[in-house]
Amino acid sequence: MGRRVVITGTGLVTALGTGVEKTWSALLAGTSGISRITRFTDPKLTVNFAGEVKDFDAEKFFEKKEARRLDPYCQFALAAADMAMAEAQPPVGLDKPNGYDPEKFGVIVGSGIGGLMAFEESAHVGTTKGWDRLSPFFILKMISNMAPGRISMKYQAKGPNWGPVSACSTSGHAIGEAYLKILSGEIDLAVAGGAEAAVCVTGIAGFEAMRALSTNVANPAGASRPFDKDRDGFVMGEGAGIVVLEEYEAAKKRGAKIIAELIGYAANSDAYHETQPAPEGEGAVRCMKLALKSAKLNPEDVGYINAHGTSTPFNDANETKAIKTVFGAHAKKLMVSSTKSMTGHMLGAAGGAECVISALSLQRGVLPPTINYTTPDPECDLDYVPNAAREVRMNVAMSNSFGFGGTNAVLVLKRAT
């Protein structure tokens, strides 16, 4: 039998709370993390709400001086990586000589946008005080590969170190590419996932100009309503989702607690439009089929899909069509939910957070709901686990990520046995 890849550590920073257990408890309670933005106000913007991370204390993770040198996206990534590594460490550490060569330890952590807050702040300084007043750390705070770079330095991971940039598929690709590198034997251990911090004036204004965001300012907590007939756009979220991946035999040998097994991955392109999914979800169909082939599974083997489920009219209808095409009659038996209804859309961090959530769903035998589902849409007619968590044991889960530019990533996970 060939090499296998397992998840032994998880880390989350979301609008529902800093830490895996805070987020998980809120998800099962059907709590919305979406509310009025506290970080800024601008009367020229219509959208004044988001899935903002409110409880993150940088000084719990960094010295004050170091924190000032890091954009929030990088702070979120490093904090989530610390959580994941702390969970993965016992009972035998990951450091040499306990089995891992630093050169076989990789870090693949991406961000869809990178240091947008640093960019916004520096542009303001330059235009109001002069460009000679820019911080020497501006570029380092802005570039999106600084998160994997800093993680690799902290843990002396001397294998591949890079960050994919593929919009909302970013961290799905990051985890999938780390998975492939472990399967191939290039590395034995990886920190993988993504982070994003675009809840700032530039981020909100940019997506508002595209008319991509919900404008339900009267009810922020109810604004993200995937698959509901009254959905009117996505809600910006932020945070990080990180996993530690290990080669199965090595993890087993050191007595690691295995959370779930990663058994399949696929990536492809719609090659159709900058923002709209291909008609009938054609690209998503091919990607899910490729992921099933990668996992050596039949459609009926899958019990749950953590959907991309953005709460936009186009995505949710097309993703539903794609699921029905791939799974046929089994689609009606599938349980499908979108946790973006509670976290908001974390952009480049979404796939990482949703991979963690999918792994926990398999491990703990309970599915988080799709909240705010009140008015069924005839085009969206699957079981979306509406409004309340559901206790159910299943063996296989799929996590979908689809991004602007027509980029797709699908992960397939199996319950640890």
Image (cartoon, rainbow, N blue to C red):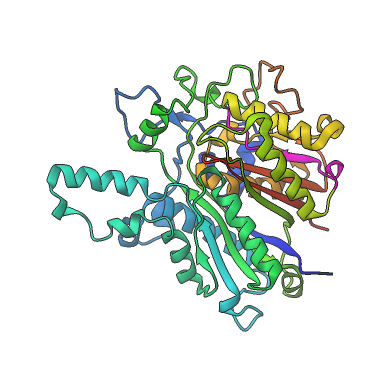
The answer to whether residue 375 is seen in the rendering is yes
Choose between 167 and 20: the one closer to the eye: 167
Looking at this view, name the residue that lies furthest to the bottom: 97
What residue lies at 30% left-to-right and 57% top-to-bottom?
139
Q: Quadrant of the C terminus?
A: bottom right
Q: Nearer the viewer, residue 279 or 107?
A: 279
Circle count: 0
Report x, y in % for residue 190. Answer: 60, 66
Residue 306 part of the magenta segment: yes
Q: Above or below — where is 134 with respect to 14?
A: below
Q: Residue at x 62, y 84 (%)?
A: 97
Q: Quadrant of residue 16?
A: top right
Q: Position of residue 348 (x, y in %)?
A: 51, 46
Residue at the spot x=54%, y=43% of the render? 168
Which span is picked out in magenta? Answer: 298-311
Who is closer to the viewer here, 318 or 270? Answer: 270
Q: Visible in this render: residue 389? A: no
| Percent coordinates x, y for residue 256 in the rendering | 71, 67
Residue 5's quadrant in the figure?
bottom right
Q: Is residue 382 left or right of residue 348?
A: right
* The image quarter in which residue 108 lies: bottom right
Left or right of 380 in this view: 214? left
| Nearer to the camera, 373 or 312 | 312
Q: Residue at x 47, y 47 (%)?
A: 112
